[in-house]
């Protein structure tokens, strides 16, 4: 029996109809005379209450996995004779997450690989539900197939025919070619999700008339399942399409729904955001080493400071301003540091950076749209 939980997919287990119990002999019956009893596997440690979004996802996955294991144990050791006597089938697994149907990735690069890892890691789908295609890089396709057991093809017709959800994970400059190649292959019941930065919904909808389209703006932290993703629905996309898109991106981090006209700002804030944070950490390491710390030590301190501060924000639900004030004693070291930052226009520089990135995203929409 599979150990993968499904939301919409129900796996059925055939039961014998002859009324005979198919219970395996129990351990004491199987043990040769005189053999020592095998030590029992220790029970699973209790699950600790998650405190972060990533922890919550791991918690859900582990809980679903344990529930599955319990089902398997019950199935193989016990004999559901009441059901068996009726000669019926029993639903072996129904869980609260999952996507039915096949997801086809058009573009098999970094973003597609991150989504494949997340979807399988979070058990949202099984490998059989994932297909991928790209333009020419056979080695990359083969790596995805070998590592994750997903199906790969070079044919857009084949992938569009098999999949009910198509994820367009190509660079913005390749989008017009992909849309041309998909012309006539996309059905009205397809959900098309684009992750290409700067390609407006209207461009995709014009090329694939009638299709439900959702545009997503994830960020590079999808590679470690910590993306901040915003999704926006097109004209033919309903709540169910949006919910499916959210389920897909939740597998690689947090996901929020916005109107499309806000996606440029989202691009400026969270799409390009990891780079601002890398720049901050880079500057902190540089300063630390200039002031006498060893490089690796400065790096460790800076990264852990960032992780700790982010976790404080995530768990305390307090405003960042309130947390900042709490750690800033009048006349203390932190106050001296923050004054230096503001003297050099720290907040204004960040505002300018996000504004410029949003403007560039808008320009790109006009260029590619
Ligand atoms: N990576 C990120 O962290 C990130 C974050 C936010 C948004 N995004 C968005 O995600 C999209 C993909 O980014 P990426 O980093 O995954 O790019 P990537 O690693 O360069 O992958 C692009 C993929 O598109 C394929 N491709 C190009 N033309 C194609 C065609 N005509 N038909 C089928 N496949 C085609 C390429 O195939 P070949 O290798 O065979 O050429 C490659 O597999 C971009 O639009 C980007 O804006 C990415």
Image: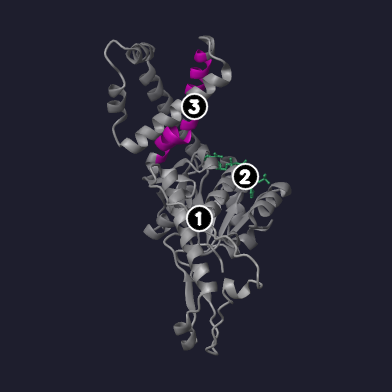
1 vs 3, front mark: 3
Decide: marks 2, 3 in contact (CB < 8 A)? Answer: no
Disc number placed over residue 153 in the picture, else none:
none
Q: Residue at x 38, y 24 (%)?
A: 351
Q: Residue at x 51, y 26 (%)?
A: 278
Picture quarter with the N terminus: bottom right
Q: Is mark 2 within 8 Å of ligand 1?
A: yes
Q: What is the C-alpha distance between the residues marked 1 and 2?
A: 18 Å
Q: Is mark 1 within 8 Å of ligand 1?
A: no
Residue wearing tag 1:
192
Kindly give the residue lying farthest to the right in the view shown. Answer: 139
Q: Residue at x 65, y 50 (%)?
A: 134
Pointer 1 or 3: first along the chain? 1
Q: Is 55 above or below relative to 334?
A: below
In the rendering, at what x and y percent does residue 157 appear? 63, 61
Decide: marks 1, 3 in contact (CB < 8 A)? Answer: no
From this viewpoint, is residue 213 visible?
no
Q: Is 30 above or below relative to 251?
A: below
Residue wearing tag 2:
109
Disc number placed over residue 303 in the picture, else none:
3
């Amino acid at each position: 029996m599979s150990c993968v939980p499904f939301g919409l997919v129900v796996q059925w287990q055939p039961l014998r109809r002859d009324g005979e119990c198919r219970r395996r002999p129990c351990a004491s019956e199987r043990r040769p005379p005189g053999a020592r009893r095998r030590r029992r596997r220790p029970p699973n440690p209790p699950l600790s209450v998650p405190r972060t979004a990533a922890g919550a996802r791991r918690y859900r996955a582990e809980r679903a996995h344990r529930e599955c294991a319990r089902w398997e144990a019950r199935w193989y050791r016990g004999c559901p004779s009441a059901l068996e006597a009726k000669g019926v089938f029993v639903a072996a697994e129904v869980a609260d997450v999952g996507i039915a149907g096949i997801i086809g990735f058009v573009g098999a690069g970094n973003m597609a690989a991150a989504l494949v890892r997340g979807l399988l890691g979070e058990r949202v789908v099984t490998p059989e539900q994932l297909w991928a295609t790209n333009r020419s890089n056979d080695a990359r396709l083969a790596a995805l197939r070998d590592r994750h057991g997903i199906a790969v093809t070079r044919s857009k017709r084949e992938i569009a025919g098999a999949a009910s959800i198509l994820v367009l994970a190509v660079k913005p400059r390749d989008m017009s070619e992909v849309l041309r190649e998909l012309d006539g292959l996309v059905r009205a019941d397809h959900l098309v999700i684009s992750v290409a930065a700067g390609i407006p919904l209207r461009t995709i909808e014009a090329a694939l008339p009638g299709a439900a389209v959702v545009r997503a703006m994830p960020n590079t932290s999808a590679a470690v399942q910590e993306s901040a993703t915003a999704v926006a629905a097109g004209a033919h996309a309903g709540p169910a399409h949006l919910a499916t898109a959210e389920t897909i991106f939740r597998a690689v981090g947090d996901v929020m729904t916005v109107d499309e006209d806000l996606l440029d700002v989202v691009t400026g804030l969270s799409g390009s955001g990891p780079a601002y944070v890398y720049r901050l950490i880079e500057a902190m390491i540089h300063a630390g080493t200039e002031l006498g710390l060893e490089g690796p030590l400065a790096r460790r301190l800076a990264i852990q400071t960032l992780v700790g501060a982010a976790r404080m924000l995530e768990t305390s639900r307090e405003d960042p301003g309130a947390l900042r004030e709490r750690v800033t004693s009048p006349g203390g070291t932190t106050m001296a540091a923050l004054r230096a930052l503001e003297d050099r226009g720290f907040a204004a520089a960040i505002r300018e950076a996000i504004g410029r990135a949003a403007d560039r995203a808008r320009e790109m929409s006009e260029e590619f749209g």
